[in-house]
Amino acid sequence: MRLEDYWGVGPKTSEQLTAALGVERAVEAIESANVRALVDAGISRGRATRILRRASGEAGMDVLATGDTRSVYDDLLSLAAEYALTEHAGDRIRVLTPLTDRDAIQARLDEVLDARDAWEGLGAKQRANVVDAFDEYDAGGGSDRVAVETALALREAGLEGNTFDALADVDPDALREAAGALGYVRETDDGVEVLEGADDELDRLRDQLADARELENAAFDVIDSVRDGSVPDFEAFKSGVVDHVAGRSDVDPGRVRDAAPGEAVDAADFVSGTLRNLVDDLEADVAEREETVAADLRESIGGAEADVDAAIDAVSDVAFYLSVGRFAAEHDLNRPELVEDGIAVRNARNLFIGGEVQPISYAVGGHGLPDEGMAVSERPPAGDRVSVLTGANSGGKTTLLETLCGVALLAAMGLPVPAEAAEVGRFDRVVFHRRHASFNAGVLESTLNSVVPPLVESGRTLMLVDEFEAITEPGRAADLLNGLVDLTVDREALGVYVTHLADDLSPLPDSARIDGIFAEGLTQELELQVDYQPRFGTVGKSTPEFIVSRLVADANDHTVRQGFEHLAQAVGEEAVQRTLSDARWSPED
């Protein structure tokens, strides 16, 4: 396959990858989602990630129908990657894409939830040992030896479950023996290299060879050193050379003597000939010993080849699944039920909001979520294909859209979701559109171009659209919203539309409803108190009296406070005073 056949790989990128990796290795890196290889070849991490996402899940990327949907997708994977146990696991998480095959989704869910349970089943010390093992793996560059040692450490940590069957099936004794051999033998372009420490005799011969080469490069120094001993004749000089070389190289004097030339015309000829022959002899001995040791090492590795290969493959997969399982455990993610139509969540949470949050139950389309223990107002109705969500400012309406978008995308990727229970349908496209503050014709046109085409395409679409009134005048925004609701129903799509214009809408189709979120007052700290759980079939009311009450309470300047008190009369002075009383505030405060 040509590199330029991959999405995002143009002539310049192809040339860069070919120069750094070669075509075959570059294709292998793309097919195996190896972000590191592409980054090392000079491709930016962001671009490498985008290339690999398309290479591994081209069809699934079509689910991300808008920029805001893609933003949620990116944020979800970035959050999950924070729990990666290795660099490569983080890269594999970042290139996850929505899956188009339901069996593949279920299979990934099985693996991830199995890994989540395994992570939760480890004690604190075991978890620390697992993290340390993967840290060593990364520090060692993911070499075969380090992978085998990591596999042994993971076995000892007590990981159990289907995800770790490959680790359980290997022979630990064979791996230990192979790990030692893998640490000392390395394939090079010139053959096999045996590293220092593998064999004492080989190390001794190499040291002697290094010393002999050093002496050969300084032959005249050898002559000067021996002559300084005031040798009386040439025979004494030759004996002195043998003793000097033997002492400096730790080579047996007899071996040095055997290396000496039979006939030498002078001192320089004798010294250079002796050292040249000695180096040649030692090089031959080193090569022979290295070949013998390498054969022994390869035999040790070959005897455990199947276990070694299984361990190397398993460590990469375990790192990935355990990383995602760790993410799922940290955020209490659960298996969604995959259904044909509808999206429903019970006690769902937004992953991007820290601290204590109020869980939300919501649904559009058909569903069968259990409602035991739920208040009537918290039981999502089933069957309505569109909801129009209304209510207080800062009431969490956009957050609810983002939560539903996140649930739909996580389920599509085969990942558990942040809800006590969830049913997620099959969506060909998810259209999430946040509110825009700009008010001009260009924004209106771009917004309609963003949300309408995916709605009318074949297949099923989930529409999550926020506040059209922010991009055109309210009356016309209500007309557009009516049209979108009707179009959503006609196209058998699902939709949640946020608006403050519920009272301006024409009668909605029978399969659409209006829901509301309500503010309930101010806390003693003058923070807006909101019940974020929508009330179904009820128009939520804006609460300007609460906001004006807070402004009255916060005003330090007397004149400014009078201005806000004048606004209080406009929105209902009695309601403002009641709010301030409930918050236990008085002008003297």
Image: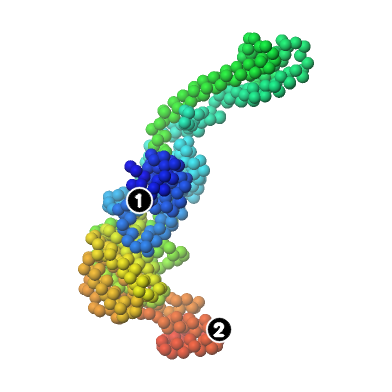
Q: Which residue is mark 1?
A: 7
Q: Is residue 54 visible?
A: yes
Left-right relation of 232 to 516: right
Is disc 1 surrounded by few (<14), some (14 to 19) or many (20+) residues within 10 Å? Answer: some
The residue under the point 44% across, 33% down is 175
Q: Which residue is mark 2?
A: 556
What whole-number distance in Å separates the C-alpha atoms at marks 2 and 1?
Answer: 59 Å
The residue under the point 51% across, 89% down is 562
- Counting from the top left corner in percent of width and height, residue 391 is at 36, 76
Label 1 SS: loop
Is residue 129 depicted above or below 445 in this figure? above
- Counting from the top left corner in percent of width and height, residue 147 is at 46, 39
The residue under the point 71% across, 23% down is 221
Compare residues 465 and 405 and report the one nearer the observer. Answer: 465
Q: Which mark is residue 67?
A: none
Mark 2 or mark 1: whose residue is earlier in sequence:
1
Left-right relation of 559 to 4: right
Q: Nearer the viewer, mark 2 or mark 1?
A: 1
Mark 2 belongs to which amino acid?
Asn
Is residue 23 depicted above or below 214 in this figure? below
The residue under the point 48% across, 28% down is 190
Q: Quadrant of the C terminus?
A: bottom right
Is residue 187 depicted above or below 26 in this figure? above
